[in-house]
Image (tube, coloured by chain):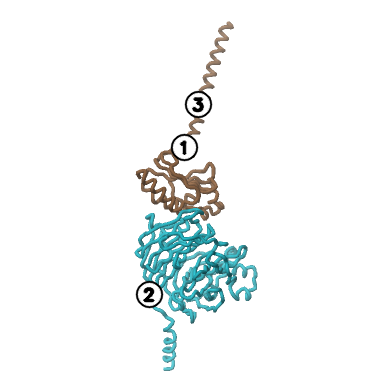
Amino acid sequence: MIKKGLVFCLLLFLVPFIVNADLKKIISIGSDNMDYHFFVIAGAVIDAQNNVFVCDSRGSFVRKYDGQGRFIKEIGKFGQGPGEFSNAISGLYLEDDLYLLDNGNNRIVEIDRELNIKRYIKIERPAQNILKYGDRFYMVSRKGGQPFFEIGIYDRNGNPLKYFFEHRPGYLEKVELSKIGFAVSFNYSTIAMAIDRETGEIAVTFQWPGESIEIFFYSKEGQFIKKISVDHPIKYTFPEFRLKGLHSMLKFPDRSNLIMSRTIHYLTSSRLLLEYWVSEFELDKAVEEKEYILIIDKSTGKVAHKEELTTKMGIMDVRGNLICGASVEAEVPQVVVYRLSI
Amino acid sequence: MDLVKSTKKKVEMKKSVTKWTLIILTMLGFLNWGCNQDNISLSRPNSKNIRISFEIGKNSISNRGCALCYLKNRYQWNFLYRMLKGSTDIEFIVYCPDEIKNDIKQDLFFDAVFPAKKIPQDNVFTVYKQGKVAYQKIGSLDMSSIRRITDMVVDLGF
């Protein structure tokens, strides 16, 4: 009787953290037709009217599609001049306007939703991705000559205001940096970040998580707020043996996993969505790769839902219940939009 | 007697000259044929009405070990091939350094690959119509250039 009561209490405790979710693919764009063909999709975002905006780094273009995935407009060609983009585009963010991160030309391009270029903003160093909140830009980049990534806050003209998250907070202090320790920190220090469109709060996580998924929260001014540690939904040991360049020194186990938290997004102010890849290896050969989305409750740090994606993709934007990303499973890359029902 | 000897000598000399002339002419003929063969294989006169060439530039080849890891415009070129190859009167030719020919054969679509006589600094894409340059793009083959090439080829009646 006591046992049953305990189980009941445990269930009552768990129910609020478990979410039933359903994913449905609603838009898929990508074919050999000229207006629908992509080479390397560098960014894809969706607005409140379900218009999809896509930038392609190899094609040097930005395109707009309607909510049914029909082509509306394309701008751009390769070059350094007005209306031209490099082939090193590495991000697209949508606030009221679109913000294209054109690393090859060292600039952010502000574009309205009818795809008219409004202005160019010079940037001092290439960045990995771009977010915007109010009149501030947030970008992940590396200081010249430094191995670790950091987050920069820039004003509306691209002038740096502050850098934060220079290294894994509290991590390097604990680790004695042997040759391997340094390489671990270096190779697995790539970070992903997201911004809460409501409050401007910033969430940062490591793309290569350790024994647990650590998520750090910062204010829009770059002040540290808190950290949560989320348990991996599978049994996982941080695989030091996968270090690039040190393979010959370390023996591969017969079977192992490699996990990557590629991107992080705010679903709501209290829930985060994590793009979570699990690759299974036999010795040094990948035998299976699965992609999940994890819905994480921010207050408890628990995984509220885990869903495997049927089409593997890089998630590029989450707006409301729509998830927009790029799939490379087919011969021609595709932009796909899922509706998430919770 | 001297006259007979001299006539005999003259006839022998004539025979010898004729023999050597024939030998030299035959050799020249062979040489000329060989050179023509070489020209055919390297510069390829227009067997098709439209020829699109991709000269791989030095900037695209970082090292021999992993040539195609760094080969710019690979996706764009293969897309162009897929778009236009429906017509039998267009041929796609790749010019590249001899040492990466095998890598190229695995990852690029083409009708013929030839060793480049001179390697340009950057990639060069050229559309030839009946042997004359109709369009040339140096650097990145972006979507805008692909649209131009496709429109041009369509306008030419393909």
The kind of residue on which mark 2 rests is: Ser
What distance separates the C-alpha of mark 3 from that of mark 2? 85 Å
Of residue A121 and residue A318, the one placed in the foreground of this image is A121
Q: Quadrant of the C terminus of chain B?
A: top left
Task: Name the residue at 43% across, 56% down.
Answer: A75
A35 left or right, relative to A92? left
Q: Colour of chain B?
A: brown
Q: How many labels were placed on the picture?
A: 3
At mark 3, the secondary structure is helix
Name, please, the residue furthest toward the bottom.
A1
Question: Pointer 2: what residue?
Answer: A341
Task: Name the residue at 53% across, 52% down.
Answer: B67
Question: Pointer 1: what residue?
Answer: B40
Task: Name the residue at 54% across, 54% down.
Answer: B66
The kind of residue on which mark 3 rests is: Thr
Question: Pointer 3: what residue?
Answer: B26
